[in-house]
Image (cartoon, helix red, strand yellow):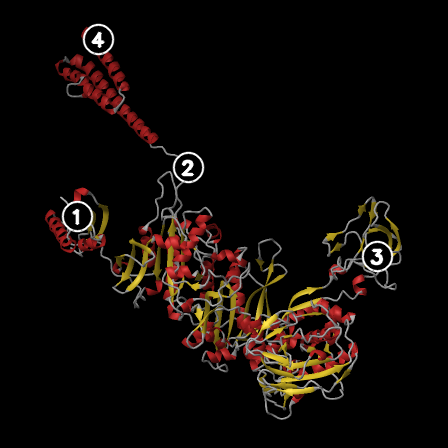
Amino acid sequence: MKFTLSWLKDHLETDATLDEIVDKLTMIGLEVEEVDDKAALKPFVIARVLSAEKHPDADKLKVLSVDTGDGKPIQVVCGAPNARAGLVGAFAAPGTYVPGIDVTLSVGRIRGVESHGMMCSERELQLSDEHDGIIDLPEDAPVGTAFAAYATLDDPVIEIGLTPNRPDATGVHGIARDLAAAGLGTLKSGAVEPVAGEGECPARLTIEAPDLCPGFALRLVRGVKNGLSPKWMQQRLIAIGLRPINALVDITNYITFDRGRPLHVFDAAKVKGNLTVRRAGAGEKVLALDENEYELTDEMCVIADDNGVESIAGIMGGEHSGCDEATTDVLVESALWDPSNVASTGRELGIITDARYRFERGADPEFMVPGLELATRMVLDLCGGAPSETQIVLGTPTSTEGEIVGKTGHHYKEVDFPISETRRLTGLDVGRDESIAILTRLGFEPKGDAKGDTVRFVVPSWRPDIDGKADLVEEVMRIHGVEKIASAPLVSHDAVGETILTTLQKRTRAARRALAVRGMMEAVTWSFIPAKHAELFGGGKPELKLSNPIAADMSDMRPSLLPGLLAAAQRNADRGFADTALFEVSGTYEGDRPEDQRRVAAGVRRGTAGLAGSGRDWAGNAGPVGVFDAKADALAALEACGAPVDKLMIEAGGPDWYHPDRSGTIKLGPKVVLATFGEFHPRTLEALDVTGQLAGFEVFIDAVPEPKAKATRTKPRLDLSPFQAVRRDFAFVVDRTVEAGRLMRAAAGADKKLIAGVSVFDVFEGAALGEDKKSIAIEVQIQPLEKTLTDDDFEALAAKIVENVKKQTGGMLRG
Amino acid sequence: MSKAVTEQMTDLKTLETTLLAEIAAAGDEASLEAVRVAALGKKGSVSERLKMLGSMSPDERQVMGPAINGLKNRVGEALAARKAELRDAAIAARLAAEAVDVTLPVRQSPAERGRIHPISQVIDEIAAIFGDLGFAIAEGPDIETDHYNFTALNFPEGHPAREMHDTFFFPPDANGERKVLRTHTSPVQIRTMEAQKPPIRIVIPGKTYRQDSDATHSPMFHQLEGLVIDRTANVANMKWVLEEFCKAFFEVPSVNMRFRPSYFPFTEPSLEVDIQCDRSRPGEVRFGEGNDWMEILGCGMVHPNVLRYGGLDPDEYQGFAWGMGIDRIATLKYGMPDLRDYFNADIRWLQHYGFRPLDMPTLFGGLST
């Protein structure tokens, strides 16, 4: 919402400075976004051309002698065809910044003749596109004074960012009301005198969509002379960014901004028959004033005549019945429209207009008729003519109660306001008298003579946003002054926090740090990915496809973090960084219910970016990453999350997107999948358009069971055996399909007390072992607990290990 | 002195000269040992001469005894000294052979190579501050119903405020209802009120989505919501909490904050908050000084309708809520120039703007280092 300072002062009697007004507007909730104080025009002064001689060396240039008011004629070289002795125009001295040509003037020499400044065109001052000649002012323009002030171009323009709850501040009068309430002056009366008319309005109006049109006022003015609107009106419209068109149209725009009351004018000669407010027919078309043709739906409200649609209700008029210079009889409309219907129609058609802006916020119903009277008065003043009587038609009155106030059927809301509510909600103590005074200045009327804490207020018709006492607290607070609220500590006795983080939150943090400590960089990638990527990773469900994605390749909610990370690794590779280790801990989506959102930690290593580091090194080059890097990452993340690492089962193979023989699944029991890991299927990488050596994992943090509640934090007692720990090596020949994990479990199971650990130190296959055989060499760590073991004891233990391995895996001890 | 004695003395002298020369010439411990055995061994030259003392006259013995024993001692000392010399030389030679170029680089520790994304780090900073103020951290789903994202937050159907949100929609379900990507973290207010009785003190960090993209708007971004509900919490308390947070977060002794009235459907009264800062240095913002006001958050008293939607009586309970952009406050504190880089996973950006894995924000250790 834009307006100028002089426009504001039409409605507000005030001595306040521009700065005071701007500060106050912001502090009462009408945030000033921009102030143009027209400082750029200040250096230009009015000057008279004393003489104009032909330039000695250029046919099209003239050498002017210019009087700028200080008595010393100044020499200026000028190329304008209208430069002549006696012309009064706008002069810029050397050192002046000329906005239209983006140049700061200096004393110049043009074809050998010195020039000490410039006589400017309108375009050079950015007043218009006019550049055929220099500005030509009336003879009596005061030479030596500021041009901007003379031309009334120094009126500062203020733009406020209006919140959607304040339709009353879509007009200058409403803004003035707020400032007056806040003590910055006195509000001038906005009362409108009715204009008497003669005879019935000949175009009869019917409302067929009463739910969308609560009221409609219409009158005809005959015999108008439509031309340009007066300069003061044009200047104000230009100042706020509107293009003056003709007096009739300008009047409607002016009142839109002056009072927040949009109007429409029809050229009566172009309207055929009577007017009807109705829903559009599906597919019905209208050529609007913006010269676009719009196809309407049967949810949209229009004003139609025998020709068809003449106006999209509350949004934009039709081109066909618009007013131009030839208009002699004009139908002036002031109507009320259902705000949400205007909003949805505007949104669907993609039309943003000043009328829509106001109607969707809610135009003051009590000003429908006065707005028409004001418009009639201005039409008569500017264009002449004779008005008919006003025709008022009502849709469904919002109330059946009593007299139809202002002939719109508006029912005034009433709110009971406990004066103490302001203190309850804000901590600010505003007295009873002050509270009532503030609300009264804003147009709220106290009702009855309640003596207690609670006062009943009648809500003014221009404040549809006010529903309850909290709304009135805001009014009192913002006008009294938010800055008067002193901060007060939040008392801690009812603090809630027994636990600040949930288990899942703790695990999320732990997984992050654990993976970063392994040399991986945390990425945050988009939650939405290309449909093709989603489908490759088990997604692509219709309920997870956005109806209005920001881009075609950001359409599907991701079923996995891996495609985003793989794409990120590839982007880095394309930039020259082939060895990357990336991870992300975030959400994936299995469906659209809250419980379908998973918490996942995933990572991808590319090239040679293993744990120890990547690339070549004098002490040993890093090898390509593989399934075991991913497995180690997954286990590290699981361990950090508190998963029971000793109970995990590692199964060969993972989901389809992995390499079938270089991937695995980590489970807890037969059903709970905690993680998958592996190298990727070549077809997956090809489909993702990703290349290079890659391995990755996903850990499902939310699948890790909650830890059992513990009564104490004391750790279990540790008995330190005094007997020396020893290690024994065994090598077994097993079938190629036997998993090392099974063999390790078999060995460890031989004596759960004595065997503290089993590790694999060698695996190999060779012809000497026989077809489909392999050798697995393990080291068994033995911790005697009760006595030093004798050779016999060792032999007995070794025999048990060999026996167990043979029984469970078929493995034979290598001779 | 008899002639025999004189001859023997000359012989001893010659022997000593020879032995000392042999000791000095011994190049390693083995040859030195050979010299020792040849001199002091059972049949060594010095030992043989000592044995001869027994057959000498007392007069001869009186002279030759000390002379031969003296020779034995001097040879023994020379042997020991030479042995020590040879050991030192051997160690020196071994050390010299083991020399390396210590300026050769070593691989960086993985814990130094890894990075935590600024968003995660800032969320941890926020958790440290609000945890200390007695707040719990709450979360909610990204895919929301219209009810939680709008209706229960007092956004009337068709209200212009809904349009300000540039919502991402999912296709309508069988009942014609469309899920949305949450446009703010505020739905968690309702979810929390439904799940828990007051007093409530939570902050809600999380992903939010709006259909908007440029240098300062990303279709995905992060918000921090705060909610306090009890029987007395008011605007004055809210000012205090937000001031405490800004001081702690920006790590400055004081901040100037300007609260001005605004509008949000889910709060009444509503306020926007500007923070005083100095932006005169390019690419850098300093808080607690300067003449600029920068908007950092929106807040207000929870709207009575929102309390009702959450199942609470607005005459019994009251409270405040706020929302701010995590990406935005991260940018203000750490200075990333373009919001879009947050989600690009460019390892150069992560390396530069990310945080070392072991830099965990705590109040006692300092939020940032």
Neighbor class of circle 2 (other Cα within 10 Å; few <14, some 14-19, many 20+) is: few
Count of picture labels = 4
Q: CA distance from mark 3 to mark 4?
A: 144 Å
Where is residue A116? Give x, y as percent.
Answer: 82, 50
The extreme bottom residue here reads A402
Q: Chain of mark 2?
A: B
In this figure, which residue is indicated by the disc labeled 1? A732
Q: Chain of mark 1?
A: A
Where is residue A643? Give x, y as percent.
Answer: 31, 61
Q: Chain of mark 4?
A: B
Choose the circle earlier in sequence order: 4 or 2. Answer: 4
Q: Are marks 3 and 4 on the same chain?
A: no
Asked if disc 3 and disc 1 are in contact, CB closer than 8 Å, the reply is: no
In this figure, which residue is indicated by the disc labeled 3? A82
Q: Is residue B231 visible?
A: no
Q: Are marks 4 and 2 on the same chain?
A: yes
- Between disc 1 and disc 4, the foreground one is 1
Q: Quadrant of residue B297?
A: bottom right
Neighbor class of circle 1 (other Cα within 10 Å; few <14, some 14-19, many 20+) is: many
Q: Is residue A500 visible?
A: yes
Which mark identifies residue B103?
2
Quadrant assignment for the C terminus of chain A: top left
Q: CA distance from mark 3 to mark 1?
A: 108 Å
Q: Nearer the viewer, residue A40 or A299?
A: A299
In this figure, which residue is indicated by the disc labeled 4? B6
Where is residue B226? Give x, y as percent.
Answer: 49, 69
Q: CA distance from mark 2 to mark 3?
A: 81 Å
- Between disc 2 and disc 1, the foreground one is 1
